[in-house]
Image: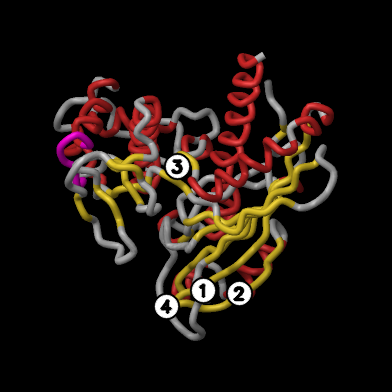
Amino acid sequence: MTYFKFKDRVEDFIVEEMLGKEPEWEWDFHYIFFEKKNLATFDIINKIQWEFRLNRNMIGFAGLKDKQAITRQWITLSKRDVHKYCGGINNLLAFMRKQVKVLKATYGKKPLKLGNNKGNRFEIILRAVKANEIEKRKSMIENILSDISKKGVPNYFGEQRFGHRGRNWQTGEKLVLGEIKSLRWDNNTMAEKRFKVQAFSSYVFNVYLDMRQKAGKLYSILPGDIVVPEDGRYKHRTGKEQENTDRLAVTGPVVWYDLKHAKEEALMLEKATYQKLSLPADIEKGFQKFNIYGIRRAILLYPEHLSRSRQQWNNLSLQFDLTSGGYASVVIDYLENQLTQKRGEGANKK
């Protein structure tokens, strides 16, 4: 059973990008903060690119934002490119204002790259499919939201990471394996290829996370796990399996070239993921030609400042912050899954 309608209306999903530090005045790059509605990130980037005959790599951005939503995010362009190709910043802003709502224009020292933002702030309205069903489960919902704040949720890559039809990872896999060398139907640039290759590595991580969750090891620290304490340095955890009571950032593999691997029992789980997907043992070498290097991703996502507006239960209004790379849809999916699971547990008790 589905309890809530997610993104039922455009205004039900609002996300604002947080850089963490405001761009410094008078440097080499234009920073433009804008609000868009019913436009994907690449929709506006493509419009700018085509209008001014820019290379895709000239436009920097920190993350991809949903299309069916109201979203606020930053892009960057070098002063030199804006002057040479766009006819100046006023000309560029005038064009953008025809497409989106420009909120701020300033300067920064470096261009934005994927993951450069501190995180995102979300305001989400979930509309009840059956208000009476939600009314009966008010306390259950409160308990689940409390657990989410304390324990976090599985840090899956959201479905939007995999493109409109969810197939980008399949193209990325073929590129990594060398089964194809060009993109027939897309912008055949290295940036586009890298995007699809990254979708493939994201898919592999999701499979790893799914296997770890089914094994009941999601909230545990395994021997050989790579954890990230507050000092931000990767460390292999030794000793017996233990409960992750300190909210340590236990990580899983986002498979790229030169990935730092876990050890012992945790490494066995990583290898089992490759085997389940029938990937060759040297799959990581295929990422080298795309100049993509391995990273570790936290297996748990902790929504910060999670709160619920006190209003009618047929409109459940949530606010929370997520770190860069976290997906709000994953939080909502977890809420739905927990409601379904607890409903089933209640039925079994009867």
Ranked by sequence position, the earlier of labels 3 and 1 is 1
Which residue is at a point 58% across and 34% down the rendered structure image? 333
For the residues marked 1 and 4, what is the alpha-carbon distance in whole angstroms? 9 Å
Span of residues in magenta: 259-266
Q: Tell me if residue 278 comes above or below residue 46 in the rendering.
A: above
Q: Which disc, if any, is residue 105?
A: 2
Judged left or right of residue 343, residue 12 is right
Q: Is residue 117 magenta?
A: no
Closer to the eye: label 1 or 4 = 4
Q: Which disc, if any, is residue 234?
A: none
Which residue is at a point 60% across and 67% down the rendered structure image? 33
Near-viewer residue (337 or 71): 337
Q: Main secondary structure of the magenta part?
A: loop
Q: Are marks 4 and 2 in contact (CB under 8 Å)?
A: no
Question: Dot 1: what SS?
Answer: strand
Near-viewer residue (61 or 158): 158
Q: Is the residue marked by circle 2 packed among few (<14), some (14-19), or many (20+) residues within 10 Å? A: some
Q: Quadrant of the N terminus?
A: top right
In the rendered image, residue 273, in percent from the top left (x then y), is placed at 27, 27
Q: Is the residue marked by circle 3 packed among few (<14), some (14-19), or many (20+) residues within 10 Å? A: many
In the rendered image, residue 350, in percent from the top left (x then y), is placed at 67, 14
Identify the amino acid type marked 4.
Lys
For the residues marked 4 and 2, what is the alpha-carbon distance in whole angstroms? 14 Å
- Residue receiving disc 4: 109
Closer to the eye: label 3 or 1 = 3
Identify the amino acid type marked 3.
Asn
